[in-house]
Amino acid sequence: MTCIGVILAGGLARRMGGGDKPLVEIAGQPILQHVIDRLTPQCASLAINANGDPARFSALGLPVVPDSVEDFAGPLAGVLAGMDFAAESGASDMLSAPGDTPFLPADLLSRLEAARTRAGARIAVAASNGRIHHAVALWPVALREELRRALVEQGERRVSAFIGRFASVVVDWPSQPYDPFFNVNRPEDLACAVAIAKEESRG
């Protein structure tokens, strides 16, 4: 299996007051850099899914892949953009993760892949603290044309609904000492993330 990681950074960040939420800094680095640092050892290569001027991400040194579906079609459009990028790179699989989740587990890809193989599933999805994180998933690139049809012809916008069309497996992570899928949605979440980063640096 060759897996490319795609970081979904195309959201509108309304609850953070707009702008590029993944570029907000935690512990001296953009949230997006923390995501990159977590995924780099796990994937063959990485790309960022984002719309607008890609130059704002140039300091991160990764290719920026825009949505091919217009009108901010949500994370499912980012998954498709990532699958297309992975296919062009010759990868068999794509690992997706949001750009606002700075504490992703180091065993994310390995556990998703192992569970998918054991279950004979097509897609493996992460979960923690009683919640399924549909945007954190391992996808076969072979599903990209079915996803394109779902988005363009059927107007599907829900990641969970598309995953529900296929055999999938959910993989649960412990949420202590903190939830590895904690995401920075609101200004108050930022303070939480800073505290977690400080604890990590002490450990």
Image (cartoon, rainbow, N blue to C red):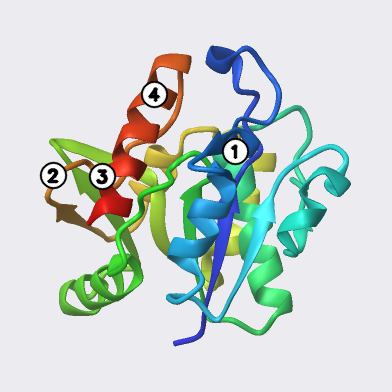
Q: Where does label 2 land, which residue? A: 177
Mark 1 is surrounded, within 10 Å at the Cα level, by few (under 14), some (14 to 19) or many (20 or more) other residues, namely many
Q: Tag 4 or tag 1, which sits nearer the N-term?
A: 1
Q: Secondary structure at mark 4?
A: helix
Q: Tag 2 or tag 1, which sits nearer the N-term?
A: 1
Q: Secondary structure at mark 1?
A: helix
Q: Is residue 137 above or below residue 175?
A: below
Q: Tag 3 or tag 4, which sits nearer the N-term?
A: 4
Q: Residue type at mark 1?
A: Pro
Mark 2 is surrounded, within 10 Å at the Cα level, by few (under 14), some (14 to 19) or many (20 or more) other residues, namely few
Q: Where does label 4 land, which residue? A: 191
Residue 135 image offset from top left, x and y in percent: 43, 45
On screen, residue 37 versus residue 194, left or right, reads right
The one nearer the camera, 92 or 104, is 104
Label at residue 72: none
Label at residue 22: 1
Q: Nearer the viewer, mark 4 or mark 3?
A: 3
Cα distance in 3D space between marks 2 and 4 = 16 Å
Q: Tag 4 or tag 2, which sits nearer the N-term?
A: 2
Q: Residue type at mark 3?
A: Glu
Please give the name of the residue rendered at 22% of the width and 41% of the height, measured from the top-left corner. Answer: 179
- Quick one: quadrant of the N terminus? bottom left
